[in-house]
Amino acid sequence: MADIKVDSPPPYFPRHVKSLLDDLSGKGGSRSEKADVPPEKIAEFANDPNVKKDILAEMDKLSELALSIKSSFDVVSKLLKEALENASLNELQERLKEFSEEWETYCQSYNDLLKQSRDTAKKAGDSADEFFKRVIPLLLDDTVSMKQKKEALEVYIKGLDGNADQSKDMSQQYSDLKRNVENFSLRWPDVVQIAEEDKAKLDKELDALNASVAELDEEVERLRAKVKKMKDIIIVAGTCCGCCTALGWICPCYWIPAFFLSWVIGIIGVLLYKARRKLKRFKNKLFEKNGERDKKAKELDKLRDLQATLEKATPSIAQVFETLGKFAEIWAMIRADGVQVSAGLDSLSDMHIPSLFKDMLEATKALYETLAIALRRYEANIGQI
């Protein structure tokens, strides 16, 4: 909704609202074309049903987009709160808390600005109504003196001054909020990096644990194989137990190998028991760490999803803020048109108004009637939020 300048128009040409409606309808043409449009063409433009239809459709799109941005703000707010609740790292919790609180202020600011834009549309619609229903008919009335016309127009313009200042402030608020949201999106990857580094550190711990578990598995298998081998030797020896017993009574030294084998099996058994316990501890730790990694992976996925949401929403947010920021300047546009009409009156010496001026006022009347309809549409679409 660019503020388009018109080259060398008559001083009373209401270029500001015409430019606004041109942009909304998509039928504005080039700057040079706009400069040479005669009053009857302007009136034809403003009264064209297709133009009005296009303008209302554009207001529908603008209000729909404005409300969708409100939903985007709410979605990001919800994701931030969920990420904060699930964050396990203190540093990450602190950063998420800061970001969540910051985003809440942006949510509130946007809600306030959206309400202000709705209220502005209502008040500006009332002013547009007054301009085309009361002020312009009075200016066209040949029975009213030039002094009365100028006084009436001056009163109307002064009535716009306070709202014009307020609309400038609102436009600035949109610009500030747009800049803050863009800055927020640029800083968000720093939060994701904290989570990525934390997960990478945990991945290293898991790699080390997996290596230890693999080594312990091999150790347990090796000890188990030794125990089995020793047991097999004893079993073989047991088949000759009668002979061994007799020999043992005759020569006790025959008992020594059997006792030695039993002692070795006992030692290996103790080592096997300890290795199994250690393996169990490591596997339990590995299980816990895997669970922790899964949790951190989910945390990271949520943070990345949030980043994707921000990246997707930020251009739309910027577009809406820019459009609504210009929309907030409607008061300044109306006032500027009033001042231009006033300048046209100042150029006249008596109460007689030339036909060209009358044609321009008729065209202005048609423009402001269309503007009032468009503003009412936006007000109704935003509704109670």
Image (cartoon, rainbow, N blue to C red):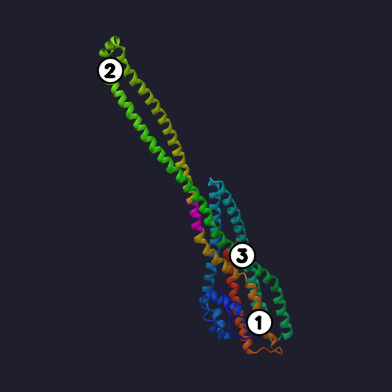
Q: Is residue 231 magenta?
A: no
| Residue 288 x, y percent position in the rendering | 46, 39
Q: Are marks 3 and 1 in contact (CB under 8 Å)?
A: no
The label on residue 238 is 2
Q: Nearer the viewer, mark 2 or mark 1?
A: 2
Residue in the picture at 44% in, 39% down: 286
Left or right: where 351 falls relative to 291: right
| Residue 301 x, y percent position in the rendering | 47, 51
Left or right: where 81 falls relative to 236: right
Residue 37 lies in quadrant? bottom right
Query: What's the residue type where badge 3 is placed?
Result: Asp
Residue linked to disc 1: 340
Real-space CA distance between mark 2 and mark 3, rounded to the nearest whole angstrom? 92 Å
* Residue 374 shows in this picture: yes
How many numbered marks, from 0 up?
3
Q: Residue at the top extreme?
A: 250
Query: What's the residue type where badge 1 is placed?
Result: Gln
Magenta residues, as a range? Answer: 301-309
Residue linked to disc 3: 176
State the SS at label 3: helix
Residue in the picture at 72% in, 77% down: 155
Left or right: where 20 falls relative to 278: right
Q: Nearer the viewer, mark 3 or mark 1?
A: 3
Label 2 or label 3, whichever comes before in sequence order: 3
Neighbours of disc 2 within 10 Å: few (<14), some (14-19), many (20+): few
